[in-house]
Image (cartoon, rainbow, N blue to C red):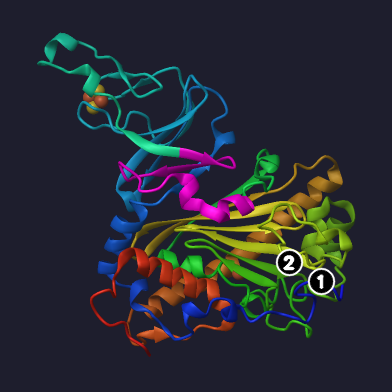
Amino acid sequence: MADQPNAWGDFPRLHDKYPDLGTGPVPTEPYHSQAHFELERDLIFRKSWLIVGRVEEIPNPGDYLAMDIEVARSAILIVRGRDGEVGAFYNQCSHRGSKVVRSGTGSCKLFQCPFHGWIYNLDGSLRGIPDEKGYFDLDKAGLSLTPLAADVWSGFIFVNFDPQPAESLSEFLGAFGTDIGDYPFGAFADNMAEWRVELNCNWKIFKDAFQEGFHLPFLHHRTLGGIYSNSSNPFNYVLDCKLYPRHHSMSQPGADRPIEPTGLMKIARDFGAPEAQHAASLQANEDHAFSYTPGTNWTRNPRWDVDLHAIFPNITMNTFAAGRYLINIIWPLSLDRTLWIARSYSPKPRTAGERFSFEFNKVFLRDILIEDGSTVEGTHAAIRSGAKQTMPLHEQEIMVRHDRKVIEDHVGFYRDREAPRG
Ligand code: FES
Ligand SMILES: [Fe+2]
């Protein structure tokens, strides 16, 4: 243990690794400015690769996902083509603009618009038009569904609203994609719990809540108290962080003296799969010195419990040592409305005990997520006054600081004027 990098009690000063990031207060205006939000819409959400689903959701040719992406003012359609490849289109009929399919999931051999019956192939090409002779000089080859850039990384389907994306998905993800890409995301695809919540807050306020673990001893003391922090690590410091050009990761240890679970938590741990042990408390165990990929537990610390990742612009993800992961897909609906989609993936229960454990952990996670959601609306209601123009950030809030910088680099809100300095 003594030879472990970042061993227990040896927490690194995160900002020392990234001196160019600075340490000053950051402006609050980007959380409540409509002008800033419009720049985010045009220069981030209409230019970046965005996760819209997983390949397991559309396993067979003809399977599709249709959804509205409010921040891009678009309805989109993700389709598994006859060739097995994933494609994406605007879900907008070339006739008078009706959605070709209603939002949701489904499977079909062809798409037929419900309004006047135009028919499209799975590759988006126009196949047929009822009463075609009644139209004038149609160029059918030019009336396909409008394609959208789409690509897949580790089973996650991304789209990009830029007609000519400046970067490929692989370039956009960069070293982060290489470091995390081999995590077994697909192994848990058949056992997912999902929550969808609309929140009255700016999307960045919500995202920030998942970009640091420093709040655990306070906001989560009823649920996670003692599991991560105790007198040895009272403020839940992390083992290390990695800042990529746009994305970032933190590696989080469990407590050095695990609490002894009682009641249902004890039953869940005793009879459940490994994730039950996580929920109850991870025992210090040399097995946890392992890593799934170069981007998980990269300090190889035996007390590693979970990594916190953020994929720019609107994804946070937790990869747990106990073999499961949580992803938050954070969609801005407007400046002050956010759709939060939380998906928790874990191994499918094989026994009644594992089933009990799974259900317990689902409820346990729900309670933690409710705690996370509980502050964000109040924060937005308070911060929008502009009474405080800046906020100081803690050493452990480096991913929040990095995110503010990356967003400013994209939108240039303060490029031609001075940012408030507190
Ligand atoms: S709008 Fe689709 S067929 Fe008319
Ligand atoms: Fe939290």
327 up-or-down from 391: above or below: above
Residue 316 drawn in magenta: no
The quarter of the rendering in which ligand 2 is drawn is bottom right
Quarter of the picture holding the C terminus: bottom left
Instruction: Out of 197 and 159, give the one closest to the viewer.
Output: 159
Q: Residue at x 63, y 82 (%)?
A: 13
Left or right: 287, with 420 as reference point: right
**Left or right, 417 with reference to 222:** left
Image quadrant in which you'd find residue 250:
bottom right
Residue indicated by mark 1: 4
What's the amino acid at mark 2? Thr
- Near mark 2 (Cα within 10 A), the count class, few <14, some 14-19 or many ≥20, is many
Q: Which residue is mark 2?
A: 299
Left or right: residue 231 versus residue 242 is right
Whole-angstrom CA distance, mark 2 to mark 1, is 8 Å
Q: Decide if residue 200 is in sight here.
A: no
Please rate how many residues cluster around mark 1, counting C-alpha atoms within 10 Å: few if below 14, some from 14 to 19, many from 20.
few
Q: Horizontally, is 26 left or right of 357 in the view?
A: left
Q: Are marks 2 and 1 in contact (CB under 8 Å)?
A: yes
